[in-house]
Structures are given as structure tokens and as C-alpha cells.
Image (cartoon, helix red, strand yellow):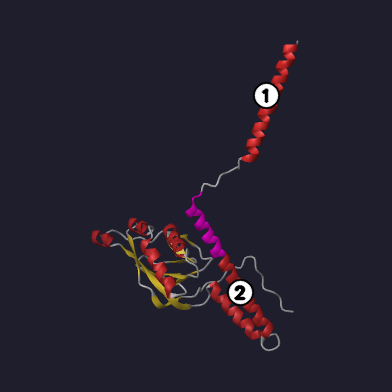
């Protein structure tokens, strides 16, 4: 009888010890370990600092606009309002813009021309990837085959043709025009695109990408469609 009691007591102590050990390991070991190396952490930190800088710049712009409204409260608030509307139209891509930038020419590849292969339109998927590659740089204004690309511009297949803003683009060759804000940014973008591995994907489709040298002035067309303001309504005048 005494042996049974000791055995049961020993078993209970063993179970309690096992549960304590499991709980201790659970508390002291994190759910997931950060396996990033120092370079990846530095890149993440650089992205966060860039975002912080952009937010500070935007706050500064809004403060400046507010200051203009306060100064013009008794003089000409209508003029300040007009200037603000014009700035917003520019930011939305509704106006033509001229500044430092570059052109990118999408053309049939020389191999396709020599061998007499049919040149088809650039696919929406490839065009979207290339636009995303360009948009890695901030402050970019872009038009493709004369069609302005804004934040809401759809790039998709319509009846077998690649279309931007619902309008089909031409079969290559055609131009892409990019305003980069400054000549320095244009040169950085040019070097980035020339070295990008995405260019190899164009050769597969019998196309080539010629990134032209940056220029002091590039004119990018304004968006000529109607903005889809699904969640906005015009305010009624009092």
C-alpha cells in the first residue's frame, strides 16, 4: 500500500515538473525569431526614415498652405483657394507638366525584325511590372503613348488590346515620357532602368527597351479623362 502511494506521489511530481518546464520554455522563447541580417535591417530602417521624411515634407506643405489662408483671410482668400486648387490638380495629374526627365522607347527587337516575326502589343502584365519599376522612384510623372498614368489609371486587356484609362495603346514602337522632378533624379532613374533585369522580359516578347539620356525639359501630357469620385460628393453652397 505504501509503495502505491509513493509511486502515485512520484508520478504527480513528475507531471508537475514537466508542466513547469514547458511553461518556462514558453515564456522565455519568443514565438518567432527575427532572422534578418544587418543589411536587411538597415534597408528597413532606411525605408522608415524615407517615409518619415516624406511625412514631414507633407506636413510642411500643409502648414504653408494654412499660413497662406490665415494671411489672406482679409485680403484675397479666393486667390489662395484658386492656387490651392491648381496645386491639387497638378498632384492629381490633371495638368500638363514640364521638367527634367527622360524618354523610354518601346520598340520591336532587332532579332524580330530580321527574322520577320510578328510584333504584338505589349502585355498588360509586363507593362504593369515596368510601371511599378519606374514608380520605385518618388515624384514621378508618367505618360505612355500619350496617355497620362495617374494613381487610379487601370492597365488592362480590353477586347484583346492593352489599354490605359480605357484607351488602347499602339503596337510598338511607342514612347513613354517620364518627368522626374530634377535632372539628378532623372539620371538615377535612367541608370536604374538600364540595369534592371526586367528588360530581359521584353526580349522574350520580341521587344526592346531603349532608355534615352535625361533631358532638361520633358513635357508629360495631362490626364484627359474624368476622375472616378466614387466616395466623394460635391458640397452644396450655402
Residue 178 appears in the picture as rendered: no
Residue pushed farthest top?
Answer: 1
Magenta stretch: includes residue 45: yes
Alpha carbons under labels 1 and 2: distance apart? 65 Å
The image quadrant of residue 61 is: bottom right
Taken as a whole, is the magenta stretch helix, strand or loop?
A: helix
Find the magenta span and give its range. Answer: 36-51
Asked whether the beta carbons under mark 1 and mark 2 sit within 8 Å of each other, the answer is no
Q: Residue furthest left?
A: 114
Q: Which residue is mark 2?
A: 60
**Does the magenta segment cover residue 161?**
no
Residue drawn at 30 percent across, 62 percent down: 109
Q: Secondary structure at mark 2?
A: helix
Q: Position of residue 59 (x, y in %)?
A: 62, 71
Say which quadrant the N terminus sits in: top right
Q: Residue at x 68, y 28 (%)?
A: 17
Amino acid at each position: 500500500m505504501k509503495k502505491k502511494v509513493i509511486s502515485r506521489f512520484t508520478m504527480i511530481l513528475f507531471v508537475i515538473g514537466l508542466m513547469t518546464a514547458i511553461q518556462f520554455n514558453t515564456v522565455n522563447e519568443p514565438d518567432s525569431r527575427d532572422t534578418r541580417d544587418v543589411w536587411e535591417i538597415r534597408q528597413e530602417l532606411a525605408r522608415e526614415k524615407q517615409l518619415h521624411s516624406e511625412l514631414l515634407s507633407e506636413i510642411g506643405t500643409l502648414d504653408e498652405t494654412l499660413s497662406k489662408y490665415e494671411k489672406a483671410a482679409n485680403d484675397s482668400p479666393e486667390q489662395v483657394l484658386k492656387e490651392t486648387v491648381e496645386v491639387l490638380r497638378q498632384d492629381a495629374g490633371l495638368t500638363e507638366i514640364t521638367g527634367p526627365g527622360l524618354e523610354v522607347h518601346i520598340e520591336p527587337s532587332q532579332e524580330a525584325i530580321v527574322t520577320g516575326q510578328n510584333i504584338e502589343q505589349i502585355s498588360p502584365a509586363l507593362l504593369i511590372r515596368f510601371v511599378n519599376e519606374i514608380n520605385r522612384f518618388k515624384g514621378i510623372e508618367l505618360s505612355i503613348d500619350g496617355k497620362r498614368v495617374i494613381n487610379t489609371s487601370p492597365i488592362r486587356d480590353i477586347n484583346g488590346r492593352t489599354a490605359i484609362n480605357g484607351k488602347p495603346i499602339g503596337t510598338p514602337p511607342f514612347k513613354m515620357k517620364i518627368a522626374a522632378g530634377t535632372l539628378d533624379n532623372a539620371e538615377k532613374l535612367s541608370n536604374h532602368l538600364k540595369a534592371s533585369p526586367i528588360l530581359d522580359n521584353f526580349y522574350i516578347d520580341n521587344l526592346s527597351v531603349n532608355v534615352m539620356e535625361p533631358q532638361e525639359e520633358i513635357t508629360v501630357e495631362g490626364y484627359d479623362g474624368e476622375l472616378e469620385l466614387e466616395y466623394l460628393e460635391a458640397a452644396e453652397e450655402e
